[in-house]
Image: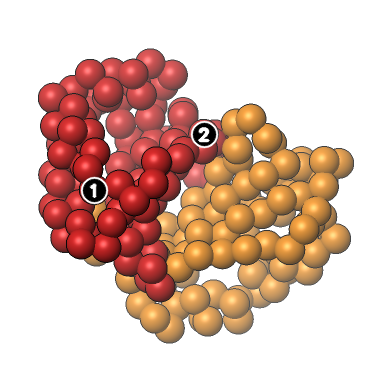
Chain colours: A orange, B red
Amino acid sequence: MVIVTVYVHVKADCVEKFIRATRENAENSRKEPGIARFDVIQEAENPTRFMLIEAYRNAEAPAAHKETSHYMKWRDAVESMMAEPRTNRKYVEISPDESGW
Amino acid sequence: MVIVTVYVHVKADCVEKFIRATRENAENSRKEPGIARFDVIQEAENPTRFMLIEAYRNAEAPAAHKETSHYMKWRDAVESMMAEPRTNRKYVEISPDESGW
């Protein structure tokens, strides 16, 4: 598995718009065969900051995700909402093992 | 829900020991009624760095977790393995909604 955490900081007046666009992308992403999980969470004390936790079943799945129409729609929709560039980190699963995702 | 992400940096010679202790804690934690998920992931490019993603069903569940014997065993076992103090951030769920965790 490949687990990607994406850190997003949006402009204060874009929080609701960002949530709407990102919920739609997450719901569609979870239907992709290569995606085990696609979670979106919001910092409790700083609601302009979000994390996406994207769990891919194999090494090819992240690139396949970036070719979907829902990803490209999201990417374009949120471009002007960013307060700063997104950052990400890549992880491997320790627990649960692959079958638990 | 209360989602807590915990960032852990362990000493290089403690990686395997940390994984063993943390797997055991995660497996037991997932049996707690207040815990929806308890994931442990390891940074792909820096294997001494880990993230725990702890999804609690309500505001009381994090304190209940800290009173369990498996948590206290883990806390004591990993104390000497830390390269620096653990940090954490608190989040709320955006997608999926509570029923999806």
Residue B31 appears in view? no
Number of numbered labels in the structure image: 2
The answer to which image quadrant residue A67 occupies is bottom right
Quick one: label 2, few (<14), some, or many (20+) residues within 10 Å?
some
Q: Which mark is residue B19?
A: none
Q: CA distance from mark 2 to mark 1?
A: 24 Å
Q: Is residue B36 left or right of residue B14?
A: right
The answer to which image quadrant residue B25 occupies is top left
x, y (%) of residue B80? 22, 43
Residue corresponding to mark 1:
B81
x, y (%) of residue B87? 45, 40
Q: Chain of mark 2?
A: B
Q: In the picture, which quadrant includes the N terminus of chain A?
A: bottom left
Q: In the picture, which quadrant includes the C terminus of chain A?
A: bottom left
Q: Identify which amino acid the numbered label 2 is placed on.
A: Lys
Q: Identify which amino acid the numbered label 1 is placed on.
A: Met
Looking at the picture, does residue A64 appear above or below residue A82? Answer: below
Q: Residue at the location (72% across, 41% down)?
A: A48
Q: Residue at the location (39% across, 36% down)?
A: B55
Viewer-closest of B7 and B63? B7
Q: Which mark is residue B90?
A: 2
